[in-house]
Image (tube, rainbow, N blue to C red):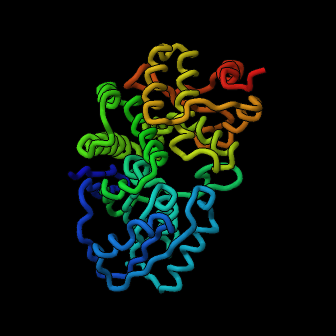
Amino acid sequence: MIVPIELLPPKPVKYDITIDALPKLSFDTKVVVVTNPTVAGFHLDRLLEKLEAKQLHVVTVPDGEQYKTLQTVEQILDECFEQKLDRKSLLIAFGGGVIGDMTGFTASLYQRGIDFIQIPTTLLSQVDASVGGKTGVNNKYGKNLIGAFYQPKAVYIDTAFLETLPKREFAAGVAEIVKMAVMFDREYFDFLKTADLGDEAQLKEAIRRSVELKAWVVNQDEKEAGIRAVLNYGHTFGHVVENETNYTTYLHGEAVAIGMVMANALAVEHGLMQPEEAEEVKALLEKYALPTDYTIENIDDFYEHFFLDKKSANNSIKFILPNGIGNHKIVKDLDETVVKRVLAQFGAKQ
């Protein structure tokens, strides 16, 4: 199953997303695989059986969102220099979204840019993070604030890598699947309400539909000048939740699930969504044991965090809201008191 990415001029780029068993891959150049100890322990031997290269090296970096930093990127760069990679060399991101983001960013930096491919091993990275060329790292000011748009040469999605995925990690990926359905496709949302994503055929169908939707968006808008911003549904709130909890309490998809519930509350307040529709989304998230509650300790602080988000501009916050289920609306310049009234729904109970 192939889903093509074809970015429009002025910088046309074409590559394929393959959803199938990982094929044999042969490269007439030096290759560095970037992974973490968890993924390596489960799957590295299988990957190496599939790879041929002029020289092949593996760099293992610590596991976790808290290590998605410039310091870790420098560690990967050091390995590239030590192995004397040149501009024809290749990096392979073998892991979840954190590995994919850092590997792609490193590839964009090394000698001003070398090729990389994505072999995502989590559901979240298979349906979202590996597709579309967003790369980067976090810092103390927020999430993904340092990075680049840098497209891979190929993406290989093999659901066999998900067999060792903890239930929490799997559910975190489902959050991104739900995001795509709520924003773009009511029929897909209804499919998810009855689907059993523990069934391989239904899981592959969900991955295919999510990847096709994201490819459709990215093909129109690589650098988030327009419709691609819609993919940030749940993220404006979710990134604040992650930042407030130092990226250690919630997985990214879990924070996005909370963020979707908050965005839905704002959509209801703004008259874009019926309360029953918001409940439908919440019920689907809870079907996969995703968190939907969060206590905001300081509403003013939470609100101010929005302005550190990449999606804010000219001191104005841009909210991505559902317009019913299956459609979306980008809302700017909402009155602060309206937003804070919604945040108060999640405030500490007196």
Q: Position of residue 99 (x, y in %)?
A: 49, 62
What residue appears at the point 31 percent right and 36 percent down from the top-left corner?
196
Residue 212 visible in the shown view? no
Which image quadrant: the C terminus?
Answer: top right
Q: Position of residue 163 (x, y in %)?
A: 35, 54
What residue appears at the point 57 percent right and 58 percent down from the top-left corner?
64
> What is the tally of numbered marks visible in this picture?
0
Question: In the displayed structure, would residue 273 be above or below residue 169?
Answer: above
Residue 99 visible in the shown view? yes
What residue appears at the point 43 percent right and 46 percent down from the top-left corner?
170
* Left or right relative to 97: residue 346: right
Q: Position of residue 6 (x, y in %)?
A: 29, 51
Nearer to the camera, 323 or 120: 120
Q: Position of residue 167 (x, y in %)?
A: 45, 46
What residue appears at the point 29 percent right and 75 percent down from the top-left corner?
49
* Left or right relative to 89: residue 334: right
Nearer to the camera, 171 or 219: 171
Occupied quadrant, residue 291: top right
Nearer to the camera, 170 or 255: 170
